[in-house]
Image (cartoon, coloured by chain):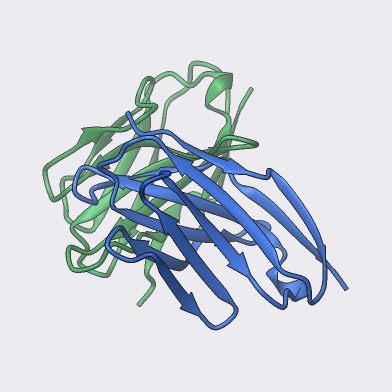
Chain colours: A blue, B green
Amino acid sequence: GENVEQHPSTLSVQEGDSAVIKCTYSDSASNYFPWYKQELGKRPQLIIDIRSNVGEKKDQRIAVTLNKTAKHFSLHITETQPEDSAVYFCAASIQSFQKLVFGTGTRLLVSP
Amino acid sequence: NAGVTQTPKFRVLKTGQSMTLLCAQDMNHEYMYWYRQDPGMGLRLIHYSVGEGTTAKGEVPDGYNVSRLKKQNFLLGLESAAPSQTSVYFCASRGSASYEQYFGPGTRLTVT
């Protein structure tokens, strides 16, 4: 089955720096790659996603890139702010988008 | 709209006891999911449903059963709780026109 690996497990940056989180997937049939943000004690919420027919997608300070050949995708956050501190999960879809397989999460800490 | 709600929010069980977690959504979504979240392991899919009256196994289905008798509700049952089932349980739902999964607030379950 699909396996999604996520790195790093923790990431500490200074406010204003950029942060990059990377994920790799194993199933070449996967074609949808969302990123979820989970603040402490809260539910995961979708922040950005990308389909396999697109190489890059941006939404203000966040962007996701996809390399289908290498089977990896990355989340980029620019000009980080303390409110970006959270756990970020990548995921990959299988079976015609019915299911998601999640990575193990990255705890991002942005220090003022 | 309440979105996705879960009942109860917290529960403590003794080994061998049974319980049912209720997930309800008011968005007329076709797809519903149950995940468990454990430290360092991300979100793992227990069972899911692609429509009223249907259920399917996810990554970690052992020890759990589910039912989807009504479109808006998805029940997760533990017949004989074990300490290994101590976790935070999240329900999610998704419409057929979008790939975004909307999560409930979670249920923290402790089995002693």
Question: Does residue B104 appear in the picture of this structure?
Answer: no
Q: Is residue B76 left or right of residue A57?
A: left
Residue A13 against residue B76 in the figure, above or below: below
Image quadrant holding the C terminus of chain B, namely top right
Q: Position of residue B15 (x, y in %)?
A: 55, 17
**Residue A99 or residue B80, whichever sits in front:** A99
**Residue B67 or residue A75, whichever sits in front:** A75
Q: Residue furthest left?
A: B53
Q: Is residue A17 left or right of residue A88?
A: right
Residue A11 against residue B59 in the figure, above or below: below
Image quadrant holding the N terminus of chain B, namely bottom left
**Which residue is located at x 43 percent, y 18 percent?**
B80
Q: Position of residue B68 (x, y in %)?
A: 20, 44
Q: Residue furthest bottom?
A: A60
Residue B42 against residue A106 in the figure, above or below: above
The answer to which quarter of the image holds residue B18 is top left
**Which residue is located at x 57 percent, y 50 percent?**
A22
**Which residue is located at x 17 percent, y 56 percent?**
B71
Q: Is residue A73 left or right of residue B30?
A: right
Question: Does residue A76 appear in the picture of this structure?
Answer: yes
Q: Residue furthest front?
A: A69
Q: Is residue A37 left or right of residue A46?
A: right
Q: Position of residue A1 (x, y in %)?
A: 32, 28
**Which residue is located at x 75 percent, y 76 percent?**
A81
**Residue A11 or residue B8, whichever sits in front:** A11
Q: Position of residue B29 (x, y in %)?
A: 22, 63
For the image, the number of numbered tags is: 0
